[in-house]
Amino acid sequence: MKLTCIYCMKREEISAETKVEWSYTGPDNKTVPIYLYENKPQEPKDVELQWKGRLMWNGSKDLQDLSISIQNVTVNDTGKYICKVYRFFKFDAFEHSAIKAVEIELKVKTKASQDTAAKYSEIMMYVLLVFLTFWLLVEMVYCYRKISKSDELAQDTATDYLAIPSENKENPGPAVTE
């Protein structure tokens, strides 16, 4: 399970030291530190046994994505996660610091619920498939009729120009004399 924490730096922020503290507040409202990033990702030394070896750094190298992942998620992981980011900026004339906190409420269920968005998109996919197939069939019939009609017209005009009158034997024309 990825717990996403993003804190983007603006272009004018030249260099910054970043410190990230992840903490967990369970149903008992007790807050405990679970992960720390200070120059490198690390588990706090006094991390509870529940989290030992289950947390992984999932952030980016430029430290704009400061996310972590929980391996082997259980119902006991339900609670509030807080990502607290400290940025220390160093400029030529002065130093500046900024703090941002992101709260994530995680509810772990024993049974996965039906994803309604996936269900609706599947239904829409089949409706669209039927509609497009029907439209293609109508378009093919229309084009076939149009081509057939143009072929008939072309044949009619060609026979009009190539028609050679045959002699009528019942009503012969005037005799040719010399």
Image (spheres, helix red, strand yellow):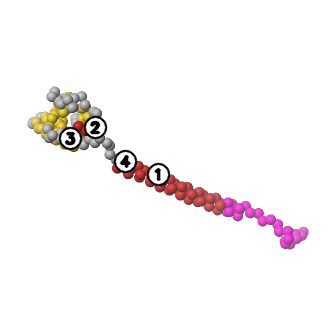
Q: Quadrant of the N terminus?
A: top left
Answer with mark 3 or mark 4, whichever residue precedes in sequence.
Answer: 3
Three-letter code, disc 1: Leu
Mark 1 vs mark 3: in front: 3
Mark 4 vs mark 1: in front: 4
Q: Nearer the viewer, residue 146 or 125?
A: 125
Q: How many marks?
A: 4
Q: Nearer the viewer, residue 133 or 24?
A: 24
Report helix, strand or loop for mark 3: strand
Calculate the distance from the C-alpha at mark 4 to the C-alpha at mark 2: 19 Å
Residue under the point 19% across and 39% down: 81
Residue under the point 41% across and 52% down: 124
- Residue 98 lies, with reference to residue 124, above or below; the image says above
Query: Would you name the residue on which mark 4 appears?
Result: 118
Quadrant for residue 30, please give it.
top left
Q: Indicate which disc residue 1 carries.
A: 2
Report helix, strand or loop for mark 4: helix
Answer with mark 3 or mark 2, whichever residue precedes in sequence.
Answer: 2
Mark 1 vs mark 2: in front: 2
Q: Position of residue 22 (x, y in %)?
A: 18, 36
Residue under the point 34% across and 50% down: 116
* Label 1 Cα crowd, 10 Å radius (few <14 / some 14-19 / many 20+): few
Query: Would you name the residue on which mark 1 appears?
Result: 129
Calculate the distance from the C-alpha at mark 3 to the C-alpha at mark 4: 26 Å
Calculate the distance from the C-alpha at mark 3 to the C-alpha at mark 2: 13 Å
* Label 3 Cα crowd, 10 Å radius (few <14 / some 14-19 / many 20+): some
State whether residue 21 appears in this view: no
Q: Indicate which disc residue 79 carries.
A: 3
Reply yes or no: does residue 152 show up in magenta.
no
81 displayed left or right of 171: left
Answer with mark 4 or mark 2, whichever residue precedes in sequence.
Answer: 2
Calculate the distance from the C-alpha at mark 1 to the C-alpha at mark 2: 34 Å
